[in-house]
Image: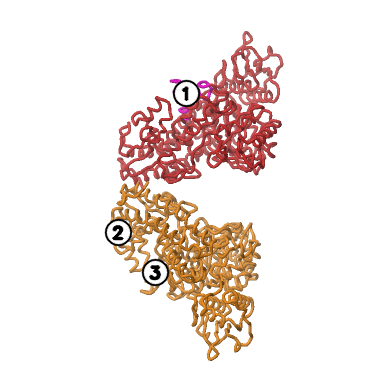
Chain colours: A red, B orange
């Protein structure tokens, strides 16, 4: 694929188009004229290349690389003055007096890399970055659910960029381009295979390890450590042992030997990501061991080399009987992991999905955040839009993630927000962070829907600084991707910021979740999971809908929170209305705070959702001629798909509830 | 697989266990002592081998083969006295005077084959067959939906016995055994590949033709002609032509050349089975041609060699909008094919599914029967239990098929039953018949559920004589399969005869159909097809359920029948109640003839269905020690599966309607 074939969207937010603003242009041309780079090795080369590429693209300038700082307009280096307050990955941009030259200083090459990318970003945004920045969150990681056959579980952007036909993809230049993209927004870890690990992928810690080493070599210069998802049954499946019992010395030795082999090839290997005892994946339960015993065994194998175990908390009974009204899947992760708090080794990190269910368009925050106080924790977000439109529908997820990050758990009283927990500020943690399930594949625009690039960008930016607003991130991304046109910025900004509300409007009301087609999870199916074994029920009948999850009379889930959150959710009056049906059962004729009945709210929001998509289409069409024509057509097509999907959702959901409740729409609109 | 490994159920109804009854034993020993066989060739060899095998197994007798009829106790031959009134496939069994010897006479070797099998069957049943028999139905055919990779579409008995890995299955002795089984009940045609023809199977009329010839060689001695399902797009896919337009001379020539090639290898090739313009299969519609033009073109290619085109009428809009209340899939076949009545060539046969939808547990008879009066017709039945329990649940289908065959269409006034139409007695037809979608696979017992062998047996027996009763066929089959034990006969007979009612009780009420899990079609999913594109809706709301298909106010489907059927279905009062919801929309509180409300009928029948399965289990368990232990355990296991399935159906359907209607069960039983 040539760069021309890749199209404009291939370069994402790193398309270094010429800066047109005269003042900014002069500023850049002055700053990048003579560069003194004091960084060695491969990362140094990346920085040098990036600066040259930017200078050329943005300012039509061929920078002179000089060796003496005093001759430079820009000094980039480790060990310069002023880096004392920096973390390992932080950077400092300052103006040197009296020369007026600029300095980007850091304690590590990685810090420099981030500083340079940040400096260039701000230049492109017409701003002049000065001051110190440290990333808020230590582990800023992507999880790829890619399989070695090239398929991507829950992937909506083509096939894997890493794997094909059981081995590496043929075009690894794409991986290098991806590493650069990720480095530009501060990602520092990546797992490269699906958490559902099959036989082929188990070989990655065995005979296929050289393939991983090859990928690690590509990511290393960009400051990104590689992780692997592993099967807990690897000692059996790969090692031929009769057991994978974590307390069995043979098993322990086997993993220790695997760790040794891995680190001999990949000295900076990050560690393992493990989905154990979850949705039929093997795990320590098979041997009567708990998750701490299971995770610690792996941690002890990796520990000597500095590796970590990322242990997923997505554990629940996936063979529930729908007739069972007592078991509540929402409670499962808390019930499983809280008794183990404090029992995990210091190089184990529990990875916790944002909500207690599974990446629905609206869920409360997992009560494990704030619950676990003696355990390393990571937040798991889903960038790939499994339940949120599959990159056919527009859904900018940053506002939702912001809600999660800003959620105050009250674990240590007011001011114990999730963003502070994952930053390691609330509890004493050796490791903490955020992982995102990647939305990237082999499509020329990486993410299927070009506007879904904003989610990848926004995810990384939030990892760096969760205090950035969703709007600020969107504005950055739009300008870096589409240039400075004000109309373009205004239209796309509005589209992005409203998209989650719109998607929610035409899909699942008031936090109840699911109602999707089983399996692939696109499109409406109100009863799709209702009589099934997945623990995901809305319990709609002709009078009411919702699950009573209160402590008093319900499943007790609300009681898993600290006060005052527990009380807030417990009461129908104080429960945030967008989560009403998650926590409470409500009659169709009950009044919401808007004064509308519940059923009328369902009808109205679904009619509104479709109208809002139609408005989005109009808005987008107003950008004809103002954005790259290929992107314009592409997004217009996706919006048509979205409209079709929205209409289907509206009609199915409205018809379902009309048929069930028998209550007509007050406004007499068409329901089938 | 050795015979021992195959188990007792491998031999089906041809297990020649010793006859124990003394009188019957003497009779057989006398009759089979000296046999004079006057038939040549491969079929003659089959007959001789069968007589010897039976004599040995049944009577421990080694028959003497003699060449002079006067010396024989049994004369079997073509061209003997008394065959004047026989059809090509009929036979005559008579006692010769004064010798007292027996004679089986026929006009053809096939007639002899059928006569010998019938004679042996009756002997084993303790009866002495005398007289003349002609098969009622000319084309008695099985359709296998087998793919060359070995998979079987809608197969529930293992993989294909014909195909594997793109070629023939390794064990073709199994095919020979199958041919003998089919011949024993008079089947005379078989199509050996799926009506959904993919690229691999298209090659069967091209480079892979030798494989078909090999199968034809196996079937030929047993009087069975081989057919192939073909893709209408074969000239494009296989021939490299730019079109498959039936009016294009190139296309016509291509098919003529293919026919020539086929008949040069398989002189008795039966013809083509075609699913065209149906569920995304290619067809003449692509080229603006109708089905008559499409079928006749193929017929003209096959005609010179005596081949026929079996053209399926399963044509409907499979991308219907569920919001569209006017389009009615039930009407589609009639609407498509009635305008073409009389336009098909004399060697085209339209193959019509028994009902207007798709092999549901309860449907009215397709109005094409009795509608088409100038067109060759075949009835298509589904022996494989796609919607009727998938050979995990017991469902003896012969009673259902009897209803279809006995249905009086009134096409020529009273006495125009479907069985007479497919026998060619009502309209002037060159060809007519019955096809059954086979339920056979590589499982050692052929049909997955051993008791499902009764459906294969019963299908063939009905083809031979549709006036046989379901009970008589079941009794034959039980005795031939399980021997003469009266308790065994009584128990299994009751199980078989009640099984369809029981299955209907716990699944879909009153003819509305569907309510199954989409795709694989096992297990309950009331809304599974409700908001989908397949034209299969129940339209349940909180007040009522059912589709108004009357001529007055409904979709008009009822008007496709002749009077008085049209009037019978049109009126809520005269419509058979088991089809109530197929033809009418009814409120949950409406009273049925039983005095029960509709909703209470739904609850009661579902509770009853589960209880009836439990009773069946008890009844079966009473046979411990009386039937082959392997079969006993196998059936007991299937019944446990069935019980689980029945409970799931009961609870999902009852909960669905309780939640929807809000009307409690009068008897206060548990509904979720």
On the same chain: label 2 and label 1?
no
Q: Nearer the viewer, mark 1 or mark 3?
A: 1
Q: Position of residue A457 (x, y in %)?
A: 54, 29
For the record, the magenta segment spans A400-427
Dot 2: chain letter: B
The quarter of the rendered structure image containing the N terminus of chain A is: top right
Q: Which mark is residue B407?
A: 3
Helix, strand or loop status at disc 1:
loop
Q: Specify the quadrant of the image occupied by residue B192.
A: bottom right
Residue B431 in sight in this render: yes
From the viewer's perspective, tell me whether residue B460 is left or right of residue A566: right
Residue B303 in sight in this render: no
Q: Label 2: which residue?
A: B592
Dot 3: chain letter: B
Distance (Cα) linking label 3 and label 2: 23 Å
Q: Residue at x 41, y 57 (%)?
A: B513
């Amino acid at each position: 694929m040539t760069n021309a074939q890749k199209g404009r969207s291939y370069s994402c937010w790193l398309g270094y188009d010429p800066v047109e603003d005269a003042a900014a242009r002069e500023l850049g041309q002055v700053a990048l004229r003579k560069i003194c780079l004091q960084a060695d090795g491969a990362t140094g080369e990346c920085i040098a290349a990036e600066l040259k590429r930017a200078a050329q693209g943005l300012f039509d300038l061929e920078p002179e690389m000089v060796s003496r700082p005093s001759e430079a307009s820009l000094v980039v280096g480790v060990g310069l003055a002023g880096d004392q307050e920096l973390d390992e990955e932080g950077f400092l941009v300052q103006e040197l007096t009296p020369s007026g030259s600029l300095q980007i200083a850091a304690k590590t090459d990685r810090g420099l890399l981030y500083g340079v990318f940040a400096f260039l970003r701000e230049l492109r945004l017409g701003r002049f970055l000065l001051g110190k920045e440290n990333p808020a969150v230590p582990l800023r990681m992507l999880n790829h659910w890619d399989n070695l056959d090239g398929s991507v579980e829950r992937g909506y952007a083509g096939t894997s960029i890493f794997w094909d036909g059981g081995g590496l993809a043929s075009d690894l230049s794409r991986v290098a381009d991806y590493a650069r993209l990720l480095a530009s927004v501060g990602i520092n870890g990546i797992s490269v295979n699906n958490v559902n690990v099959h036989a082929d992928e188990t070989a990655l810690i065995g005979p296929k390890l050289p393939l991983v080493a090859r990928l690690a070599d590509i990511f290393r210069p960009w400051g990104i450590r590689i992780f692997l998802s592993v099967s807990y049954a690897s000692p059996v499946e790969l090692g031929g042992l009769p057991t994978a019992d974590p307390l069995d010395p043979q098993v322990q030795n086997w993993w220790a030997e695997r760790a040794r082999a891995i680190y001999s090839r990949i000295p900076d290997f990050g560690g393992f990501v493990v989905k154990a005892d979850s949705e039929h994946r093997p795990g320590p339960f098979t041997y009567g061991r708990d998750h701490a015993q299971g995770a610690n065994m792996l941690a002890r194998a990796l520990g000597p080399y500095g590796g970590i175990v990322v242990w997923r908390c997505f554990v629940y009974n996936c063979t529930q009987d729908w007739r069972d009204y007592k078991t509540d899947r929402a409670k499962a992760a808390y019930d499983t992991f809280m008794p183990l708090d404090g029992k995990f080794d210091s190089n184990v990190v529990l990875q916790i999905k944002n909500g207690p269910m599974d990446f629905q368009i609206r869920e409360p925050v997992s009560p494990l955040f704030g619950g676990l106080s003696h355990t390393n924790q990571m937040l798991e977000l889903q960038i790939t839009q499994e339940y949120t439109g599959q990159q056919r529908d527009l859904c900018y997820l940053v506002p939702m993630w912001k809600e999660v990050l800003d959620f105050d758990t009250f674990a240590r009283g007011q001011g114990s927000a999730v963003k502070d927990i994952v930053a390691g500020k609330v509890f004493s943690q050796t490791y903490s962070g955020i992982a995102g399930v990647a939305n990237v594949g082999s499509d020329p625009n990486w993410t299927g829907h070009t506007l879904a690039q904003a989610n990848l960008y926004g995810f990384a930016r939030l990892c760096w600084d969760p205090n950035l607003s969703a709007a600020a991130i969107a504005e950055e991304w739009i300008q870096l991707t589409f240039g400075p046109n004000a109309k373009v910025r205004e239209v796309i900004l509005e589209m992005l910021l409203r998209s989650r509300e719109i998607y929610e409007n035409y899909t699942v009301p008031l936090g109840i979740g699911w109602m999707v087609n089983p399996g692939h999870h696109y499109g409406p199916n109100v009863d799709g999971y209702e009589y099934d074994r997945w623990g995901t029920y809305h319990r709609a009948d002709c009078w009411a809908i919702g699950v009573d999850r209160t402590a008093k009379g319900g499943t007790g889930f609300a009681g898993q929170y600290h006060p005052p959150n527990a009380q807030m959710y417990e009461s129908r009056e104080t429960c945030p209305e967008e989560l009403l049906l998650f926590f409470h059962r409500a009659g169709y004729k009950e009044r919401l705070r808007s004064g509308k009945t519940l059923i009328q709210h369902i009808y109205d929001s679904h009619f509104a959702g479709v109208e809002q998509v139609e408005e989005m289409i109009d808005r987008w069409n107003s950008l004809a001629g103002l954005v790259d024509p290929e992107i314009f057509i592409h997004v217009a097509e996706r919006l048509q798909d979205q409209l079709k999907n929205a209409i289907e959702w509206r009609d199915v959901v409205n018809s379902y509830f009309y048929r069930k409740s028998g209550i007509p729409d007050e406004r007499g609109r068409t329901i089938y």
